[in-house]
Image: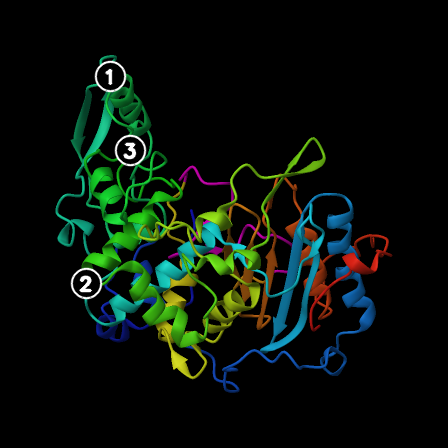
Amino acid sequence: MHRIAHFTYLSAVLAALGLCTLAHAQQPGANKLLSKSAPGAAAPQQLNFSADPKKIGVNAEQIAQIDALLQSYVDDQKVGSVVGFVAKDGNVVYNRAFGWKDVEKRIPAIVDDYYVLMSQTKAIITVAFMSLVEQGKVAIDDPVSKYFPEISDKVVTKVNPDGTYETRPVKSPMTFVHLMSHTSGLNAGLVSQIRSGVRARGGPPSGPGTSRPKYLRDSMRDLAKYPLGFDPGTQYSYHISSSMLAYMIERISGKSLRDYVKETVLKPMGMNDTDWYYAPEALPRFVKGYQVTNGKLELAAIQWGERAVSADQTYCDGALGLNGPIADYAKFCQMLLNKGEFNGRRILRPETVELMTTINRLPENSGAEKGMQFGLGFEIHKAKKPTPAVSDTAYGWGGMLGTQYIIDPERNMIVLYYQNTQGSGNVTAPFYERAYRLFDVPTGPAPARPAAAQTPAARGRGGL
C-alpha cells in the first residue's frame, strides 16, 4: 500500500485554492498533505542558453558521451532523428539534434524542429484545468456530473451475446481526481465489447478510436452514452480520461480548449511554437515519423505532422494533439520545476504543483505496471525510476512516438528526449543515465561509450 508521509498540513491554503480533499481508502487525507516550498534563490524566469558547461562542472568528455550515444541511435537505424535537452538551475548544458528530419531527402535535423508530442499533451491539459481550480470555478474532488450531468453513473457488469448489457450503480461518483489520474473507468473493461456489438449490428462506429468527429464535444457526448468499465478510483485505465478533462475545461471556462490553453499556459510562457494546428507552410518544420521493423527504419504509415496542417482544424483533444520543438516544452518543464512560475508569469501556485506531483493517486492493485505511481497528470518516480539516479522527487511522462521528459526538483534539473520513431526499444534510459552523469550524480557502473560518428552531416546540431 502506497503512503505519502511527512507533509505539512495546509488545509487553509487548500480551501482558499478550491483544492478540496478526497478521501482515498489507500491514502487517507491525501489531498490535505503538502509541504511548503523550500526557501532559496529566485527561480530562473528564462532558460539560459548561453551558459558555459565548463563553469558549472560539466566537461567535454561527459557531453561527448551523450553525443556518441545519440549518434549511435541514428547509425543503428533506431531513430530518424533525435534531440536531447538537459538544463540544471535554469542553465542549458545540452541541446543537440542528431540524424535527419527527412531520411529519404537527407535533410539534417536541428533542435528547432517540430515533433508530434502525442501524450505529452496530457500534462499541459492538466495544468490548464488546475488553473480553473485556482480560479475557484471547480474543485478536484467535485463530481464530474456536476458539470456534465450526462456522464455515466453506471458500471457495466455483463455483456450479452446479442449486444445488450447489464449495469449497476457506481459505488462512488467520478471526480476530477479520477480523470487526472486515469482511474475514471471511461471506455474501460467491457465497454469495448459493447461498442463492438454496436458495430456488429450494423450501427455506425462509435466512441474513441473510431472516426474523428468535428469537435471534441461530439466525441465526449458520445462517450458519455456508455457505462463505465469499473468503479471510479479502483483501477488504472490510460488515455481517454484526459480527453474528458479537456472537454470539461471547455464547459467550465466557456472557451474552446485551444483558446483556453493558449491563453493560460502556452502564450504566458512563450511557448509560441506549440499548438494543435498550423498553417500549411509550417509542415517543413516537422520531422518525418518513422517505424523500426525487423531492425530497419521505415517511413511511418501515418504522418501525424501532416494532420497538424490539414484544412480541418476544429478537433482539439486533451489526450494528444499538441506539437512543437523541444525548447518550448522545456519551458513548461522549467515552469513546473519553478513551482508554477516562468517568464515572469505565475501559471500555478506552488501548493498546486506540489499537490499534483507528490501524491500517488493509484489504488493498490490498480492494474498499472508494478511500482508505478501517478499523481495528477504526471507519473511520480518515487518507486519506479527510468534510471537509478532519478531522485524520489522526480516526475514526468512522455508520448507514444518517443518524446519523454523528467522534472527533478531535488536535482533542480529537467531532462527531455525527443524522437518521432516507434519500435526503437529502450533508448531513453541510457540517455537519462548519461544526462545525470553530467553532474556527477551516482548512476551505477559507467555505461560503455558508443563509437563517435565520423560523418559530418550526421553530427549533433545545436548551440550546446
Q: Residue at x 58, y 78 (%)?
A: 90
What whole-number distance in Å separates the C-alpha atoms at marks 2 and 3? 29 Å
Amino acid type at circle 1 is Arg
Disc 3 secondary structure class? loop
Query: Quick check: can you spot residue 64?
Result: yes
Q: Is residue 216 magenta?
A: no
For the stretch drawn in magenta, what is the main secondary structure? loop
Q: Residue at x 58, y 63 (%)?
A: 391
Disc 1 secondary structure class? loop
Residue 201, numbered circle: 1
Q: Earlier in the sequence, mark 2 or mark 3?
A: 3
Question: Which residue matches tag 2?
Answer: 254
Q: Residue at x 34, y 34 (%)?
A: 210
Question: Which residue matches tag 3?
Answer: 229
Q: Closer to the camera, 459 or 40?
A: 459
Q: Closer to the camera, 288 or 118?
A: 288
Q: Earlier in the sequence, mark 1 or mark 3?
A: 1
What whole-number distance in Å separates the C-alpha atoms at marks 1 and 3? 21 Å
Disc 2 secondary structure class? loop
Which portion, as a residue range, is magenta?
365-390
Amino acid type at circle 3 is Gly
Residue 421 point in image, percent of width and height: 61, 45
* Quadrant (top left/top right/bottom left/bottom right) for the C terminus: bottom right
Determine the image quadrant of residue 452. Answer: bottom right
Residue 71 point in image, percent of width and height: 76, 54
Dots 2 and 3: beta carbons under 8 Å?
no
Amino acid type at circle 2 is Gly
Q: Closer to the camera, 346 or 172?
A: 346
Residue 341 point in image, percent of width and height: 42, 78
Q: Earlier in the sequence, mark 2 or mark 1?
A: 1
Q: Relative to 163, say whether 12 is above or below.
A: below
Q: Nearer the viewer, mark 1 or mark 3?
A: 1
